[in-house]
Amino acid sequence: MSTITFSTAAVIPARPATRLRLTVRGRRVLLALAALPLAAGIAFAAISGGSALASNESTGTVSFETVTVLPGDTLWSIASEIAPTADPREVIGEITRLNLLQTGELQIGQSLSIPAQYTS
């Protein structure tokens, strides 16, 4: 009698294991599904964000007097001119905060808003 033996190396699996492969269309669908909550959040924010403007409340408007920078003007000279009795350093600080100036450099023709307490 003859016997047949099989070694483990000779056993071939019936179906090889495959990795998940996404086609181009599958990637696009997955991306669209992932972006859907973000788009819904943006749409909700855009729709509900305008409610404050649509209310019947009146808002006060603030008007500022402005000074146009002339050749030779500095923040110190402008501060001394608009508030001769006040400390120029405090006036300069308020002018820079109001106009969002990063440095003390001024451009000729630049329009600077003056704080309300220094206007007459």
Image (spheres, rainbow, N blue to C red):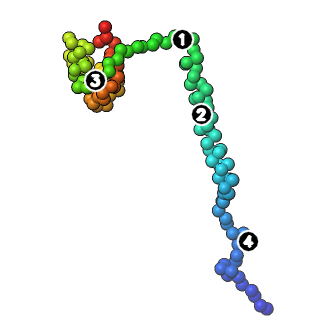
Disc ID at residue 57? 1
**Residue at disc 2, secondary structure:** helix
Mark 1–mark 3 CB contact (< 8 Å): no
Mark 4 or 1: the one toward you: 1
**Residue at disc 3, secondary structure:** loop
Residue 22's x, y, as percent? Answer: 66, 57
Instruction: Answer with left or right where residue 101 lies relative to residue 19.
Output: left
Would you name the residue on which mark 2 appears? 41
Instruction: Answer with left or right where residue 53 lies relative to residue 88.
Output: right
Mark 4 or 3: the one toward you: 3
Which residue occupies the foreground of this view, 51 or 117? 117
Mark 2–mark 3 CB contact (< 8 Å): no
Instruction: Answer with left or right where residue 60 lies relative to residue 37.
Output: left
Query: Disc 4 or 3, which lies upstream in sequence?
Result: 4
Query: Disc 1 or 3, which lies upstream in sequence?
Result: 1
Does residue 90 appear anywhere in the picture? no
Would you name the residue on which mark 3 appears? 70
Instruction: Answer with left or right where residue 67 lies relative to residue 35.
Output: left
Mark 4–mark 3 CB contact (< 8 Å): no
Residue occupying the point 35% across, 22% down: 111
**Pointer 3: residues within 10 angstroms few (<14), some, or many (20+)?**
some
Residue occupying the point 33% across, 25% down: 109
Mark 2–mark 1 CB contact (< 8 Å): no
Task: Say which quarter of the image contains residue 112.
Answer: top left
Query: Disc 2 or 4, which lies upstream in sequence?
Result: 4
Which residue occupies the foreground of this view, 103 or 82? 82
Residue 12's x, y, as percent? Answer: 70, 76
Mark 4–mark 1 CB contact (< 8 Å): no
Amino acid type at image mark 2: Gly
Q: Quadrant of the C terminus?
A: top left
Disc ID at residue 14? 4
